[in-house]
Image (cartoon, helix red, strand yellow):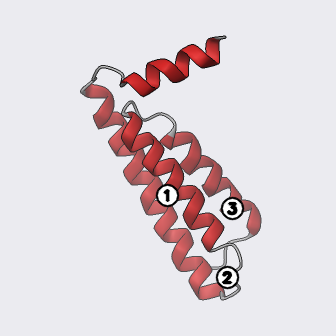
């Protein structure tokens, strides 16, 4: 199945949106960097088979992120120092 640009961009937005829900700063930032890097690196691919393969990997990653966000919310931790500094800077 060939996925169009709209579906791929929707997947990208959903991956970013779900990754921002992670409570853990380290996991959240890693996931955001990784998602942006992967999409940037693969934006010039023309092979329909590769596009479909990467799309399905993205859907699997989205489902994994959703599960991990739920599990992570069950075990809350204190915010890191970098998070409190960043939040204060955003408030000002």
Quarter of the view holding residue 44: bottom right
Dot 2 corresponds to which residue? Answer: 45
- Residue placed at 48% from the left, 33% from the top? 21
Dot 3, crowdedness within 10 Å: few (<14), some or many (≥20)? few
In this view, 24 is above or below 65: above
Q: What residue is shown with label 1?
A: 34
Q: Which mark is residue 71?
A: none
Image point 51% across, 41% down: which residue?
A: 18
Name the quadrant containing residue 49. bottom right
Q: Quadrant of the C terminus?
A: top right
Residue 64 place in picture, x, y as percent: 37, 52
Upstream in sequence: badge 2 or badge 3: 3
Height in image: 66 above or below 59? above
Q: Is residue 61 found left or right of 77 in the rendered image?
A: right
Q: Position of residue 67 (x, y in %)?
A: 35, 44
Image coordinates of residue 8 in percent, x first then y, are 67, 63
The local secondary structure at tag 3 comes to helix
Instruction: Name the image quarter holding the N terminus.
Output: bottom right
**10 Å crowding of disc 2: few (<14), some (14-19), many (20+):** few
The tag on residue 7 is 3
């Amino acid at each position: 199945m060939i996925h169009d640009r709209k579906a791929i961009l929707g997947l990208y937005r959903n991956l970013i949106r779900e990754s921002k829900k992670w409570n853990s700063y380290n996991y959240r930032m890693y996931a955001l960097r990784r998602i942006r890097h992967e999409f940037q690196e693969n934006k010039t691919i023309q092979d329909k088979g590769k596009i479909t393969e990467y799309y399905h990997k993205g859907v699997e990653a989205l489902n994994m992120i959703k599960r991990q966000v739920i599990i992570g919310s069950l075990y809350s931790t204190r915010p890191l120092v970098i998070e409190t500094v960043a939040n204060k800077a955003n408030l000002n």
